[in-house]
Amino acid sequence: MKKTSFEKKSRLAALAMVVGLAASVNLAKADWQPGQPAKWVQMPDLINGMNVLATDPMLLADDFLCTQTGPITDIHVWGSWLGDQPDPAARFKLSIHSDVPATPTSHSYPGPELWSGVFDASQYLVNPWATTPNEPFYDPANGIIGFDNIVWQYNFYIDEPLAFVQQGTTANPLVYWLDVQMLPAAVGGPLFGWKTSDQHWNDDATWSEAPFGTEPAVWNELIDQTTGTSLDMAFVITTVPEPGAAVLLGLGAAVLLITRRRRV
């Protein structure tokens, strides 16, 4: 049956809404903002913080608590580049580890690797977050090695079938560790540092010198050598579907519904 003018206009309007929302969903993936859904949040310290070297072979990790089973589909990390010289072709390895709890004689640290992913520049989104004039850039093995001025937010999205599924519950919470390591495009290239947080939970973050593809021989407690201050890292973990996804699917169905109704 030939489409009426009303049917054509209604369908085009609905499709336009779907396309518009699709664009907003993609824009929503550009970053994570305070107040948006998340399962774990440690905000960056923009007053007294520093950036800690997390460039291969340096590897950093921080712990977080899971109280609700579900896949980790979003990981957001704040960081800076030594001398504000970002590497546009940088790759990042992110991994999730089990927890080795603290003992009377040892701090806690990451256990066996449970999940990992390597993200090239086409697989993450990055945006400038804030300016922090002359913020220290810290190498745990050598102390302060320079300064930077710009904080960036790196946003990693993981397809649910490939995501790590947390197993913690309210009744049985589990501790996991997030590991971050930047893999430079070339030897001697720019250096990335993971931003510290002013929100502290459980034990300190940890560091190790472990070239990409190898397991750390030992995990060291991450402490500012100058002040003796414990350090934790800035990151967000969430499993909540992207805003607008449900609406987008609903409007897609609405397009079909409009077509079917006008054909009756």
Image (cartoon, rainbow, N blue to C red):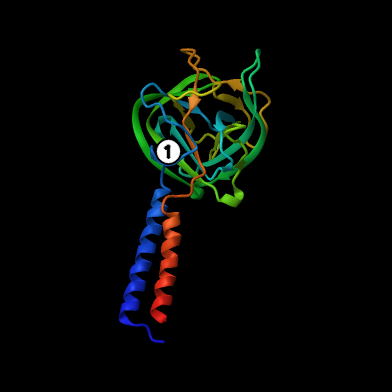
Q: Residue furthest bottom?
A: 1
Q: Position of residue 35 (x, y in %)?
A: 38, 38
Q: Amino acid at mark 1?
A: Gln
Residue drawn 41% across and 81% down? 263
> Going by the image, does 91 lie left or right of 97?
left
User: Residue at label 1?
Assistant: 153
Q: Is residue 25 above or below residue 49?
A: below
Residue 56 seen in this snapshot: no
Residue drawn 38% across and 86% down? 2
Q: Position of residue 99 (x, y in %)?
A: 64, 28
Residue 205 seen in this snapshot: yes
Q: Position of residue 44 (x, y in %)?
A: 42, 29
Q: Secondary structure at mark 1?
A: strand
Which quadrant would residue 5 be assigned to in this image? bottom left
Q: Position of residue 109 (x, y in %)?
A: 62, 25
Instruction: Give whichever of 137, 246 is nearer the camera.
Output: 246
Q: Is residue 104 above or below residue 31?
A: above
- How crowded pointer 1 is (Cα within 10 Å; few <14, some 14-19, many 20+) is rated as many
